[in-house]
Structure formats: C-alpha cells, structure tokens
Image (cartoon, helix red, strand yellow):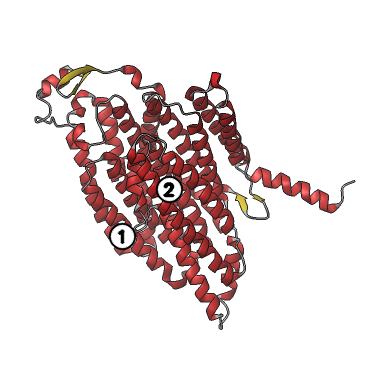
C-alpha cells in the first residue's frame, strides 16, 4: 500500500506531464528528426519535412484531448487552461504553415536540412512553454529556449552575409533583452518574495489596502516592472526595442521570417497578456500611460519606416512593428473585450502574414522577382490569380473591409473606445490610413508595366504569360519550382483571411472563451 507522499509524488508527476504534453510531443518528434539525420541512407529533408508535419498534427491531437481541462504542473510554474488552448492553436497553425512554406523554399536551393525542421519544432515547443508559464524563472528559460532556436534559424543560410549579420544582431540584442528581463525578475522577487505571477498578484493586491506601504519594496517593484517590460517589448518588436527586427527578417530564410513575424510575436504577446493581467493591471507608476505612449510610437515609427522601404521583406518587417502597436491597443483597453479583440487580431495576423510570405516565396523560387518592390512591375497581367491573392493579403494587412485585418482592428479599436482611449484610437486610425498607402503602392506596381526594364507592351505581357524576362532574355518558367504545399498555404490563408473578415463571430467567441481563464487567480 502506497503512503501519502508516494501517492502525491505519482499524482504530481502525472499532472505535470499532462500540463506539457502538447510541447513534449513536439520535442520528441524533433529528437526523432535529429536521430534519423545520423543515418546517411535517410538523411534528407523529405523525411524530416513529413515527420515535422506529423509531430504538429499529434500535438494538435493532444491539445484537443486536453482542451476542456485546467492543469497545474511543476509546483505551479506551468498552467494549461483555455487561454493556452487558444494560443497553442495559433502557434501550431503558425508552425504548420511555416513547415509547409519551408519545403518549397529549400528544395529549390538544394540545401540538406534534416536539422532545420527539428529546430522549427523546438522553437514552436518553446513558444508554447512560454505562453503556459506562470513563474518568472520559467518564463525566462522559455524565452531563452525559443530565442536560441530562432538565432540559429535566422543564420541558417550560411553562405549569405545578410543571414549571418541578421543572426548576430538578433543574438546580441536578444542577450541584452534577456538580461533586462532577468534583472527585472530579481527586483520583483526582492519586492514581493515571490516568482509566481498569481502570488505576486495577490501580494500587490493585499499591499494596496495598506496605508503604509514599505517605500523600498514599492521602488524595487517599480524598477522590476520597467525592466520586465523592456525584456518583453524586445520580443514584441515595440519601439524603441525593435532594432533587431528589420535586419533579422531580411536576412533570415523567408519561412523563418514568417515564423518570427507570426509565432514568436504571438507567443510574446501571449505571455505579456498573462503578466499584464496579473501585475501591470494595478497601474503602478501609471503603466497604462507608458503603454499608451509605446503603442503610439510603435505604430507611427513602423508605418513611416515602411513607407521608405524598397525591399519587400524589410517593408513587411516594419509593417509588423506597426501591427504590434495596434495589437498593444487591445491590451491597454484591457478587460474582457480588449483582450478578446487582441486574441482575434493575433489569429487574423498569422493568416494574412503567412499568405503574403507564401506569395513572396513563390516569386523568389520561380526567379520572377527579387525582394525589391520594383521587380513586381506587371505581375498583375502576367499572373492574375497570384497577383490577386497577394493584393488581398496586402489589403488585409492595411485593414480594408471584408478582410480579417479590418475585423481585427475593429474589435481592438472598439474596445479602446469603450475604455475611453479616444485619442489613441484617433491616432491609430490616422496611422491605418497612412499605412494603406505603402500597401496599395505595391498593388499599383503589380498592375503597371516598367517600360525602362521591359520593352514589351502590356499586350505582349498578357500573351506571354508562361514566360518571364530576365536581363532581356525569355526564360520558360519551371513549374516544378512551385509545389502543392506552397499552393495549399496560399489557399488556406486566403480562405481564413476571408472567413475571419466576413464571418468573425465563431472566431471571436473562441477568443472570448479563452480569456475568462485569465482572471481565475
């Protein structure tokens, strides 16, 4: 017969393992890919690609099985709840789309990549661990786990100097951000005596009723919160902690750029929402005003910088900075509607961003265009369906009606108005109108013919839809450079970008249900 300590030990282990099962599945499959890579007879990207997809599907399966449970694991440092269900779904979707994009991208470059897919799975599992962490040390470890995989993936194209440069900048600035977060955790622990977010929340709540609050404790807490915000703002690409974003996005392989722009950003906002609702909601040092200013500076700087770009990947990088400013508005608005709107926006963001990167990869692989925006002249005539899909994703990023981007901004802006942030909404609307210019600029170029670099008339372009011009010579397009995986990504993203814009209610309901578990402190 087991004694009580043995029974507790077994029950504790069972609960702890269940709380990280979706992440554990990904880690197991990542190690399988690494082990298979040791055998030369099966050392190729094809097997790794399919194993990675299977791993993500199995993780989805475990997520579905556990979706109606709330599980605390590892002495309360990890929690699995409805909030995690939403974010795990979004992160896994981001990872799934990234893996699909990767096959076509690397196949055309003849790169042997068995370890690439294992790094992607490690990165996705770290994102999920980050969102489910409720202990400051666990959050720090998850950030490091996620970042190390991201650094390697960013510099994966070893022969390209831009890739190496982007990885080094990301690594150096990421190290500083981690140090800020760690020092912030130390100060918060010194002020409260706790590392668990819920215990910190309860401590601050009790202290708020005391007339004589210890001055040193309040000072330590304020310093800790500022340092913590700096560390998390780096991952969210908020101004002025965005410096790594353009170079890393530009230098990384395009599928990795998609993972950083969607998965890492979603995970960063997920953990910030947890920290915000448990600590920052007390508005110590008027943190609402600080976040207000950060949101305005982020969206304004991102849009102005994007306007000056001629490189498409850098334009999307600065655009993602501006998008982070809009997303932050929902968190500032707070409450049920604000957080729900933020979650909906994040879900919409991964589809329109992945779809846009899918089109960019297609053009890159076919050697129809570089990342220079000027090379997209006339694509609307030569490739009408592809250009139309790209235009739709760009219009969604701009927030044009009947797209998911419009509904995301609508929910976030509405929540901010309900919370009384009228000036913030006014500035955001001006920024959105300004941002529409550089998105539409790309669309206009696709439906124009560059007479300086292409002597063909518009009629010639239409008639020769199966050829491309490179340095004045006609080249037949190699159809095998576009795989079914890439087409599937673009079609899926088109469907969901339209669905979230026309029928948003089921998705906002899903987001709203997941928010309720945040306040179960």
Instruction: Name, please, the residue furthest toward the bottom.
Output: 212
Q: Position of residue 138 (x, y in %)?
A: 58, 54
Q: Position of residue 184 (x, y in %)?
A: 51, 64
Residue 21 in view of the camera: yes
- Give the class, few, some or many, for how many residues have Cα within 10 Å of label 2's Cα (few <14, many ≥20): many
Which image quadrant: the C terminus?
bottom right
Q: Residue at horizontal 66%, vertical 43%?
A: 18
Q: Residue at horizontal 44%, vertical 39%?
A: 153
Dot 2 or dot 1: first in sequence order is: 2
Residue 401 in view of the camera: no
Answer with the quarter of the image where residue 309 lies.
top left
Give me the C-alpha separation between circle 2 and circle 1: 18 Å
Q: Give the residue pinned by disc 1.
A: 297
Helix, strand or loop for disc 1: helix
What label does residue 265 carry, if any?
2
Answer with the quarter of the image where residue 187 lies.
bottom right
Helix, strand or loop for disc 2: helix
């Amino acid at each position: 017969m087991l004694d009580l300590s043995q029974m507790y030990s077994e029950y504790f282990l069972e609960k702890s393992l269940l709380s990280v099962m979706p992440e554990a599945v990904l880690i197991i499959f990542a190690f399988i890919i690494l082990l298979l890579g040791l055998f030369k007879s099966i050392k190729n990207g094809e097997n790794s690609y399919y194993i990675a997809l299977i791993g993500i599907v199995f993780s989805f399966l475990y997520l579905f099985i556990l979706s109606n449970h709330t599980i605390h694991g590892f002495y309360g440092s990890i929690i699995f709840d409805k909030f995690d269900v939403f974010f795990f779904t979004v992160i896994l979707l981001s990872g799934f789309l990234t893996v699909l994009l990767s096959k076509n991208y690397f196949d055309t470059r003849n790169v042997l990549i068995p370890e690439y897919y294992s790094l992607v799975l490690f990165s996705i599992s770290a994102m999920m661990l980050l969102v489910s962490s409720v202990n400051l040390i666990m959050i720090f470890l998850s950030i490091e786990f996620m970042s190390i995989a991201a650094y390697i993936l960013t510099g994966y194209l070893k022969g390209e100097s831009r890739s190496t440069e982007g990885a080094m900048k990301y690594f150096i600035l990421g190290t500083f951000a981690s140090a800020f977060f760690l020092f912030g955790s130390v100060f918060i622990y010194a002020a409260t005596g706790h590392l668990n977010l819920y215990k910190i929340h309860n401590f601050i709540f009790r202290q708020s009723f005391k007339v004589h609050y210890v001055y040193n404790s309040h000072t330590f807490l304020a310093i800790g919160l500022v340092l913590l915000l700096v560390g998390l703002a780096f991952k969210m690409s908020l101004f002025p902690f965005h410096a790594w974003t353009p170079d890393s996005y530009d230098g990384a392989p395009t599928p990795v750029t998609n993972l950083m722009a969607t998965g890492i950003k979603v995970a960063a906002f997920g953990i910030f929402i947890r920290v915000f609702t448990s600590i920052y909601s007390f508005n110590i040092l008027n943190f609402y005003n600080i976040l207000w200013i950060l949101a305005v500076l982020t969206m304004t700087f991102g849009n102005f910088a994007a306007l000056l770009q001629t490189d498409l990947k850098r334009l999307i990088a600065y655009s993602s900075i501006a998008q982070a400013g809009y997303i932050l508005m929902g968190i500032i608005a707070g409450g049920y509607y604000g957080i729900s709107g933020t979650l909906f926006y994040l879900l919409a963001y991964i589809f329109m961003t992945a779809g846009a990167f899918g089109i960019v990869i297609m053009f890159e692989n076919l050697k129809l265009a570089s990342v220079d925006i000027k090379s997209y002249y006339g694509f609307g005539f030569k490739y009408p369906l592809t250009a139309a899909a790209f235009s739709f994703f760009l219009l969604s990023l701009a927030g044009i009606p009947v797209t998911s981007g419009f509904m995301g901004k609508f929910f976030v802006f509405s929540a901010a108005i309900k919370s009384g942030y009228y000036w913030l909404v006014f500035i955001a609307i001006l920024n959105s109108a300004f941002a529409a210019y550089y998105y539409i600029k790309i669309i206009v170029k696709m439906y124009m013919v560059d007479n300086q670099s292409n002597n063909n008339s518009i009629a010639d372009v239409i008639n020769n839809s199966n050829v491309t011009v490179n340095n004045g010579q006609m080249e037949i397009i190699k159809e095998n450079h576009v795989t079914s995986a890439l087409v599937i990504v673009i079609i899926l993203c088109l469907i969901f970008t339209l669905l979230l814009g026309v029928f948003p209610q089921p998705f906002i309901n899903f987001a709203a249900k997941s928010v309720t578990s945040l306040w179960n402190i």
